[in-house]
């Protein structure tokens, strides 16, 4: 589940050519499970129509303080009290000035004045307006009042002039929203490859060899990395899970397919987390029709699949994390795998303990990190919580030592 799931976000849109970028912000937020209520100023509606915003948010767009017939209660109070954060994107010089001076002369400015949730502004304007001393003074005032501002970008402006004043990109605004809502953005700018699920090795056209992996641990890791700002690729075997949003998903079937998919992009990654339960054996040449069983027995000749993880160190500088699913001698086996596969970290978990391993929503294990003598106990908790803990610990070690070259 995305960390923005069920978060209530009020998006104020003001009159700037960058209003079209607010559409993408809504799309990204809603894909992450957030609820978005749009409030537009009159001049914003000159740039993008309210119909677009109501279609994107799935809610009526609010533009007026005085609605006919009047709704019960006070509309500005009702809106302000029922959100986790207010984001104004794009924010014109006018709304910045009004908020800094405490002016409330329309619905959005009134909501901003009455609200006590975090306020985030993404300014957008001509560079002369941005550099104007009045705007800069208003910015200082807003900062002093604890408002959060995203610096506009330098680049080509609406009239093709170049300067500082372009609204920050929607992904940057969303990343800032996550950070304000308490989700660390420590993987921002990092590329993370996660593998998940089982692989299937065909026997014939209808049968296959596989394992009980549900993919839940790998999907939780991918979602946690997305929530923390990473650019994530998820390579998954056949699973029955909804793919996370805001990541690139590659579906594969066999160990050989997964090997090819992983190797293709492994050199471009900062982190590789192999949570997939890759099948160890496959038929060298599966039959192209359905096998008939005349004698009630069937002997299959299997050969080992490529060890994807083992082959990665020689081609990738990424921080590589493996998983070890054990039934006995866990620590000994996990450390052996970590050494033999030349990993930076390995997560030991058990297939034969209640609440851990395959198919469950929870997991428990031990994380071994390179350079650390003792493993870190990962207590029995949801796979999502465990995923976040793994990322936190891995990031600490990766930050200490630069990636291998
Ligand atoms: N792995 C892999 N390629 C394989 C088999 C495993 O990349 N062909 C990876 C898994 O994704 C996991 C790690 O290696 O991160 C350990 O997998 P595991 O199944 O625990 O161990 P194996 O290496 O398969 O050894 P064994 O089955 O003997 O325990």
Image: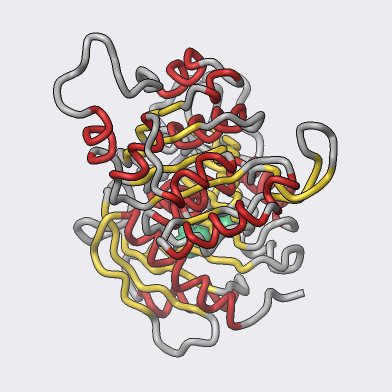
Q: Is residue 219 left or right of residue 79?
A: right
Residue farthest top in this picture? 69
Q: In this view, does 394 lie to the left or right of 166?
A: left
The answer to whether 391 is drawn above or below residue 78 in the figure is: below
Say which residue appears at 57% left-offset and 59% top-offset: 137
Say which residue appears at 39% left-offset and 33% top-offset: 105
The answer to whether 78 is drawn above or below residue 122 in the figure is: above
Of residues 133 and 85, which is closer to you in this image?
A: 133
Residue 326, given in percent of the width and then of the height, sits at 37, 65
Of residues 322 and 209, which is closer to you in this image?
A: 322
Of residues 383 and 262, which is closer to you in this image?
A: 383
Residue 306, given in percent of the width and then of the height, sits at 65, 54
Q: Where is the C terminus found, in terms of image quarters?
A: bottom right
Residue 241 visible in the picture: no
Residue farthest bottom in this picture? 373
Q: In this view, does 294 lie to the left or right of 91?
A: left
Residue 128 visible in the picture: yes
Of residues 18 and 337, which is closer to you in this image?
A: 18
Say which residue appears at 22% left-offset and 33% top-offset: 78
In this rendering, the count of numbered labels is: 0
Residue 6, given in percent of the width and then of the height, sits at 30, 38
The answer to whether 148 is drawn above or below residue 302 in the figure is: below
């Amino acid at each position: 589940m995305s960390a923005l799931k069920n978060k209530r976000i009020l998006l104020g849109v003001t009159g700037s050519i960058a209003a079209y970028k607010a559409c993408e912000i809504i799309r990204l937020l809603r894909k992450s499970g957030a609820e978005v209520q749009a409030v537009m100023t009159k001049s914003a509606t000159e740039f993008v129509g309210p119909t677009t915003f109501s279609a994107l948010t799935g809610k009526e767009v609010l533009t007026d303080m005085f609605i006919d017939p009047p709704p019960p209660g006070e509309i500005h109070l009702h809106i302000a009290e029922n959100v986790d954060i207010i984001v104004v994107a794009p924010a014109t010089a006018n709304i910045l000035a009004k908020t800094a001076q405490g002016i409330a002369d329309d619905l959005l400015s009134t909501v901003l004045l009455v609200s006590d949730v975090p306020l985030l502004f993404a300014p957008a304007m001509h560079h002369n307006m941005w550099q104007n001393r009045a705007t800069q003074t208003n910015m200082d005032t807003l900062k002093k009042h604890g408002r959060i501002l995203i610096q506009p970008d330098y680049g080509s402006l609406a009239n093709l002039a170049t300067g500082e004043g372009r609204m920050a990109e929607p992904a940057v605004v969303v990343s800032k929203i996550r950070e304000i809502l308490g989700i660390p953005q420590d993987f921002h700018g990092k590329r993370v490859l996660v593998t998940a699920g089982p692989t299937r090795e065909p026997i014939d056209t209808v049968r296959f060899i596989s394992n009980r992996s549900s993919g839940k641990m790998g999907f939780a890791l991918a979602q946690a990395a997305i929530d923390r700002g990473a650019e994530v690729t998820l390579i998954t075997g056949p699973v029955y899970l909804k793919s996370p949003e805001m990541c690139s998903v590659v579906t594969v079937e066999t160990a050989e397919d997964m090997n090819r998919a992983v190797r293709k992009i492994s050199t471009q990654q900062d982190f590789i987390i192999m949570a997939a339960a890759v099948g160890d054996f496959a038929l060298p040449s599966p039959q192209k029709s359905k096998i008939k069983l005349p004698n009630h027995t069937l002997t299959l000749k299997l050969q080992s699949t490529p060890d994807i993880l083992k082959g990665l160190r020689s081609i990738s500088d990424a921080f590589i994390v493996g998983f070890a699913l054990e039934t006995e001698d866990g620590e000994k086996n996990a450390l052996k795998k970590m050494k033999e596969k030349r990993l930076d970290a390995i997560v030991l978990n058990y297939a034969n303990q209640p609440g851990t391993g395959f198919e469950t929503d929870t997991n428990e294990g031990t994380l071994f990190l390179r350079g650390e003598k003792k493993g870190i106990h990962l207590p029995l908790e949801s796979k999502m919580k465990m995923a976040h803990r793994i990322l936190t610990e891995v990031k600490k070690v990766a930050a200490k030592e630069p990636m291998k070259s």
